[in-house]
Amino acid sequence: MHWLQALEQAANAVINPVSEFIWDYILTYLLLGAGLLFTLASRFIQFRLLGHMAKLVFTAPGSSKGVSSFQALATSLAARIGTGNLAGVALALFVGGPGAIFWMWMTALVGIATTFIECTLGQVYKVHHGDGVYRGGPAYYIERALGQRWMSILFAVFLIIAYGFAFCGAQANTIAQGLEGGFGIPSLATAAGLVVLAGLVVYGGLKSIARTAEMIVPVMAFGYFLVAAYILIVNYAAVPHMLGLIVQSAFGYGPVAGGAVGYAVMAALRNGVQRGLFSNEAGMGSTPNAAATADVKHPAAQGLVQSFGVVIDTLIICSCTAVVILLSGVYDQILNAHAAGASLQGIKLTQDAMADHLGTFGQYFIAVAIFFFAYSSILANFAYTEINVEYLFKHRSRLAITLLRPFLLVMVFIGSVANLSFVWHFANLAMGLMATTNLIAILLLFPISLRVLRDYERQRNGGTLEPVFNKRVLRNPAQVEPGIWD
């Protein structure tokens, strides 16, 4: 099929430069700048309320009629904690050196404020749904708060392309490769099994996805953390050197590829920032879709819970991968490969590093981790896609979802057995456009989230243990769905 390959190459030749320009020269700086603005405007919410965020995660009440606060967090973490936490961090180390980890941490810190802003907006402007689970997200707050229906449609379309059309297939492909490499399972068998496992959950709707995420995410995240913590303890003598290497390399003093200090710093900065942004998705507009489903008494409470998700995803899980690699002999291979001008696969670096520490068990563990990380991401991608398809087809949402679910399962099957490089490149472009649309919206709407935050803190300072929100706090309460925040 030479004509198909030629078509794919021609499409990539157009899409890749545009996508790289958006991510490298617009979004990276726009996301970082927005995060700094929100940090200042919220009076450093990520430091002032970090302890309260953690408390809310573990003490928030459940919900008998919808999705609980923790289930909404688990759903968003299912999307965020994917194979990028295993492969993406390794690639950031390969291209940007250990200093990339430092800038990844810095990006996560400002991303906490961004996540609060967008997720609080998602809660404020959520709407009722017949199945008892709220719907919301950027498409909803763009239309309700900004009154720009065309802009909300664009966002929904971009998200559906990225999360529905491509990411489901890409995550399935990663699972197939991991199981074939770790256990010798044929990709066709993996494809069939994944379709069944995903179908059993997604046909139960958003509640089913949230309940499954609630079970899988804590186990997979804590298990990965325990293994990394064991490696850290066993290699405790090398930890000070590792931390010094990360900080020195961030400012051009470590053995970062490229030689020149200026190049080394920029490589570390660019790759660390991008890895942080890709991982925690702060400002991208994906997480508010999960945040809006939560049945809570105050929008700020869910905003704070989702903000702590950045800590879990980037500051803990991504750091675990960095620790595993930097404390292994694999990092020397990274330096040698970079010096020779070779290219490496991120997931193989992580697999080799884990095997260096734990032998055969490490290889099997990574294969299992890949499965759970990617499988939970597929489920969350289904949820995000459904929410936005329902937004586009409000009056025919049942028919749209009936057609959508088998289509997404087909994408999972195809992704398991085929190379989807073109689709992946197209998804990166769609995700960049999606994030740009959301950023414009939250830069215009962030004063609303700050007003909601002030109301939440005022009630807490007045002795209220569980603040309750009323839409009269807003300047334009008529924009809010009737019956939700009355």
Image (cartoon, grey):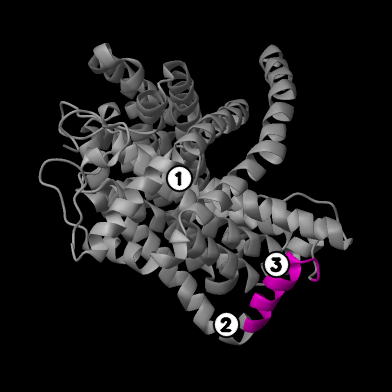
Sooner in the amino-acid sequence: mark 1 or mark 2: 1
Question: Crowding near pointer 1: few (<14 within 10 Å), some, many (20+)?
Answer: some
**For the residue labelled by badge 1, is the local secondary structure a helix, a strand or a loop?**
loop
Task: Inspect the image, locate mark 3, and give the three-letter code of the amino acid beneath it.
Answer: Tyr
Q: Is label 1 or label 2 in front?
A: 2
Amino acid type assigned to the residue bearing label 2 in the image = Asn
Q: Position of residue 42 (x, y in %)?
A: 45, 55
Which residue appears at 38% of the width and 21% of the height?
A: 407
Q: Nearer the viewer, residue 359 or 20?
A: 20
Q: Which residue is mark 1?
A: 185
Which amino acid is tagged 1? Ile
Quarter assignment of residue 189 = top left
- Name the residue that disc number 3 marks: 331
Residue 131 belongs to magenta span: no
| Upstream in sequence: badge 1 or badge 3 | 1
Q: Which residues are magenta?
A: 240-253
Question: Would you say the magenta stretch is mainly helix, strand or loop?
Answer: helix
Residue located at (68% from left, 81% from top):
241
